Image (spheres, helix red, strand yellow):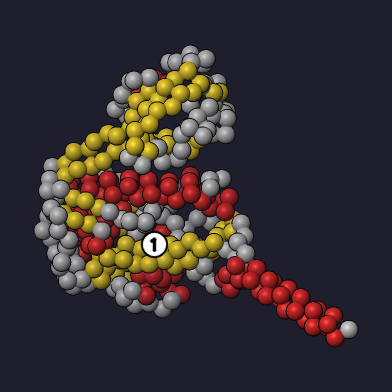
Amino acid sequence: MKFNKTRNKVIGAIFIVIVVLLFFMFPTKYYLEVPGSAEPTSQYVKVDGKHDKKKGDLLLTTVGLVKGTPFTLLKSLGNDFETISPQDELMGGETSQQYFQVQQYYMKSATNSAIQAAYSKAHKPFTKEYKGVYVMDITNNSNFQGKLEVGDTINAIDGYKFHSSTQFINYVKKLKKTATVKINFIRDGEKKEAKGTLVKLQDTKRHGLGITLTDDTVAKGTPPTVINAGQIGGPSAGLMFTLQVYSQIANKNLKKGRTVAGTGTISPDGTVGPIGGIDKKVYAASAEGATIFFAPNDPVTKEIKKYDPTYVNNYNLAKQAAKKIHTKMKIVPVKKLDDAINYLEK
């Protein structure tokens, strides 16, 4: 009898330990979007082989992504700066690995656009080298499932090299629906090839490879600029990288000893676009001591309001976030690269 009591206590203790471990560690199908980091862009940018050593900082800002557990999900309830998102909604049906690969592509694209926008503004020469088409997604019915992966760059089809995704698409359109094609692609720096047949594309009458693609390009300027963002993904650091590159190639002291943060996509023509999670980025920037925060002032059109009557643009969301945390950081609206440069120069 005594043995049974001891055994029951041991079993009960083990059960409690398992429940506690599950509560703190069991992964759910949810992610938490939380305030990330605010990091100096100078550490990621080299112009003519040199980092920017001028006093002050231009900070890129990030959103942290945390796999939800029962504990972290419960803890986030009531926190204005933590958002719970279902994995399917956040990643669009992609695996977490595919999602982060695509985010890396978006960062690569953002740095290319940043170089083009900065060199154009500084009237410095640059070239744009076309690498091929970047694989963003592969349909379930594609004959290239298991042969291609998200992140591959296709640079030839049937031996034909093309100079834009439009040329690639037009070539495939002209093929017979029973055609077998050979594609050459690059994965992790290695040249590879694969063969497969065409499949009917969903919601169309056409046949194709069954992939979602975009142009893979590399922008190179004079003097040479290298941007290596490491593990940071997404397109939202575009504006801040552009300011960093421009300040170096144009020899402009935009920082003047200040800590300047911000966010926003950048187009080669200098247009600043909206991003997600700006409230969390305001929080991160303020915590890092920024005194200025650039927020995209994207126009709220009738079409947007028709699609989403509750839509609030980035600039106004940033102001709301700043008010909640009682920061003295100045929220500055920007639509173009010039808006940010003019503000810092004045």
Q: How many marks?
A: 1
What residue is shown at x 42% (from left), y 36% (from top)? 135
* Residue 312 in picture, x, y percent from top left: 47, 58
* Residue 215 in picture, x, y percent from top left: 35, 35
What residue is shown at x 47% (from left), y 18% (from top)? 180
In this rendered view, identify the residue nearer to me: 244 or 270. 244
* Residue 227 in picture, x, y percent from top left: 25, 53
Disc 1 marks a residue whose amino acid type is Thr
- Residue 316 visible in the shown view: no
- In the image, 280: left or right of 90? left
Task: Give the image quarter of residue 320.
Answer: bottom left
Q: Residue furthest bottom?
A: 2
Indicate the quadrant containing the N terminus: top left, top right, bottom left or bottom right.
bottom right
In this rendered view, identify the residue nearer to me: 196 or 310. 196
- In the image, 223: left or right of 309? left
- In the image, 10: left or right of 319? right
What residue is shown at x 54% (from left), y 72% (from top)? 79
Task: Give the image quarter of residue 5.
Answer: bottom right
Indicate the quadrant containing the C terminus: top left, top right, bottom left or bottom right.
bottom left
